[in-house]
Image (cartoon, grey):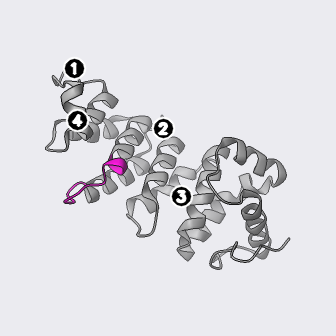
């Protein structure tokens, strides 16, 4: 099966011809738009190699700088749960790579590493948080997703970072969400109405 015009991104370095053919097939099956759980299951039912090879494909997209494909296939992967997904996504998040939809990747990383206290995932999220907080107009939607991802991943280091956000000199909505993730909003005397305005 050959890809339709414009369906294939840059040549994926290190991928075999068979993998490139499979990637084109999955791209065609995925079509346009968001890949949620139902679409991911439908794609894998027709192309089971998508579950088995997706991590290698993501590596190829990253090497090629094909971030659009990286994001799309990461959305497929998060719903097919390949072991090692967090390790593939974390460096892209940590690097603050230009041209990447960090909001989506932060959510994917939080889901892929949820409950694992994954040190690499936590470090990647912390790196992006530190890079984006000092901006004159910080990207609140992204920062809130980072806070929620840290809460989902959990563990001592994630809790330290959340606590530093909750008690630090940061925008009130961000402090509120960090405190809620830790369950310490009452201990800090936060009033929801005041903090979320």
Going 65% across and 63% down the picture, which residue do you hit?
Answer: 56
Going 38% across and 54% down the picture, which residue do you hit?
Answer: 124
* Mark 3 and mark 4 residues within 8 Å of each other at the beta carbon: no
Can residue 160 be seen in this snapshot? no
Residue 188, given in percent of the width and then of the height, sits at: 17, 25
How far is the residue under mark 4 from the one under mark 2?
33 Å
- Can you tell which quarter of the image residue 49 is in? bottom right
Whichever of labels 3 and 2 marks the residue nearer the N terminus, that label is 3
Whichever of labels 3 and 1 marks the residue nearer the N terminus, that label is 3
Q: Which of 190 and 187 is in front in this view?
A: 190
Q: Which mark is residue 88?
A: 3
Give the tally of numbered discs.
Answer: 4
Q: Residue 197 carries which label?
A: 4
Going 67% across and 58% down the picture, which residue do you hit?
Answer: 54
Whichever of labels 4 and 2 marks the residue nearer the N terminus, that label is 2
**Magenta region, residue range:** 133-143
* Mark 3 and mark 2 residues within 8 Å of each other at the beta carbon: no
* Circle 3 or circle 1, nearest the eye: 1
Whichever of labels 3 and 4 marks the residue nearer the N terminus, that label is 3
Q: Nearer the viewer, residue 138 or 108?
A: 138
Question: Is 140 included in the stretch rendered in magenta?
Answer: yes
* Circle 4 or circle 1, nearest the eye: 4
Q: Name the residue under label 2.
A: 116
How far is the residue under mark 3 from the one under mark 4?
37 Å
User: Where is the C terminus found, in terms of image quarters?
Assistant: top left
* Mark 3 and mark 1 residues within 8 Å of each other at the beta carbon: no
How far is the residue under mark 2 from the one under mark 1?
27 Å
Q: Is residue 148 left or right of residue 88?
A: left
């Amino acid at each position: 099966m050959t890809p339709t015009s414009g369906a294939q991104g840059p040549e994926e370095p290190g991928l075999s011809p068979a993998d490139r053919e499979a990637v084109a097939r999955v791209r065609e099956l995925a079509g346009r738009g968001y890949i949620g759980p139902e679409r991911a299951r439908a794609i894998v039912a027709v192309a089971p190699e998508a579950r088995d090879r997706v991590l290698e494909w993501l590596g190829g997209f990253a090497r090629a700088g094909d971030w659009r494909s990286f994001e799309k296939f990461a959305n497929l992967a998060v719903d097919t749960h390949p072991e090692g997904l967090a390790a593939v996504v974390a460096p892209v998040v940590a690097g603050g790579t230009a041209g990447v939809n960090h909001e989506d990747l932060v959510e994917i990383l939080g889901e892929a590493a949820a409950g694992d206290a994954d040190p690499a995932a936590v470090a990647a999220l912390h790196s992006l948080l530190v890079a984006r907080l000092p901006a004159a107009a910080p990207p609140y939607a992204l920062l809130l997703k980072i806070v929620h991802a840290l809460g989902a991943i959990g563990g001592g280091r994630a809790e330290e970072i959340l606590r530093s956000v909750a008690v630090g000199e940061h925008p009130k909505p961000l402090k509120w969400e960090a405190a809620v993730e830790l369950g310490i909003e009452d201990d800090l005397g936060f009033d929801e109405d005041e903090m979320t305005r």
